[in-house]
Image (cartoon, grey):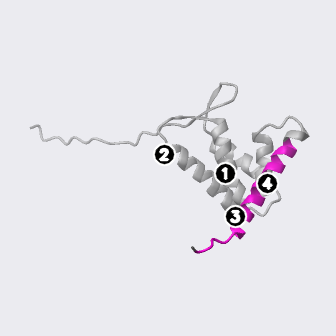
Amino acid sequence: MCGARFTTYEYVEERPIQVLKRSGAVEPFDRLKLLESVRVACAKRPVSASQMEQLVDRVEDDLSREAGVEVPSVRLGAMIMDLLRPLDRVAYVRFASVYRNFQDAGEFQEFVDEMAAAQAREELRRSQVELPL
């Protein structure tokens, strides 16, 4: 033995999340870009900055737990929509209009009608009482 001290260091290897765009391009995940798109959707709505931060944190945490490093932008948008819907319906519709890239008013109207029908089904489900047998 030489009497010298030998030290090793361990580092956590972070796998950067990559976003696969519809065009086929791949770009690094940008938390600030995602947060800004949520802020735009929530503009002038009763959604606090901390709620928006928590929403983006949750998406980022979910993505970082997955084995894959490439996430399709379509999936990323769907994750945001799933979290925005219970938070604020207007922000949800705003985000959906950009995410789904509606081409005309008819497509947008179909989306709003579908959303209203889903809400009506949910309210009906909640109002029904299970009868004891």
Q: Amino acid at mark 4?
A: Ala
Sequence order check, earlier mark of 1 and 4: 1
Residue 120 in picture, x, y percent from top left: 78, 60
Quadrant where the C terminus sits is bottom right
Q: Which residue carries the number 4 mark?
A: 117
Q: Residue beneath label 1, please?
A: 82
> Is residue 99 depicted above or below 41 in this figure?
above
Assign a secondary structure to mark 1.
Answer: helix
Question: Label 1 vs label 2: CA separation?
Answer: 18 Å
Q: Position of residue 11 (x, y in %)?
A: 38, 42
Badge 3 marks a residue whose secondary structure is helix
* Picture coordinates of residue 129, whole percent (x, y): 66, 72
Residue at mark 2 to residue at mark 3: CA–CA distance: 34 Å
Which residue is the extreme one toward the top? 24
Disc 3: CA contacts within 10 A as few (<14), some (14-19) or many (>=20): few
The residue singled out by tag 2 in the image is 65
Q: Residue at x 70, y 25 (%)?
A: 23
Name the N-terminal-most of marks 4 and 3: 4
Q: Closer to the camera, 7 or 99? A: 99
Residue flagged by tag 2: what amino acid is it? Answer: Arg
For label 2, the crowd category at 10 Å Cα-Cα, with few meaning under 14, some 14 to 19 and many 20 or more, is few
Rendering quarter of residue 108: top right
Q: Amino acid at mark 3?
A: Arg
Q: CA distance from mark 2 to mark 4?
A: 34 Å
Range shown magenta: 108-132
Residue 37 falls inside the magenta stretch: no
Image depth: mark 2 or mark 4 in front: 4
**Badge 3 or badge 1: first in the primary sequence:** 1
Q: Viewer-nearest of labels 2 and 3?
A: 3
> Which label was assigned to residue 125?
3
- Residue type indicated by callout 1: Asp
Closer to us: 93 or 27 = 93
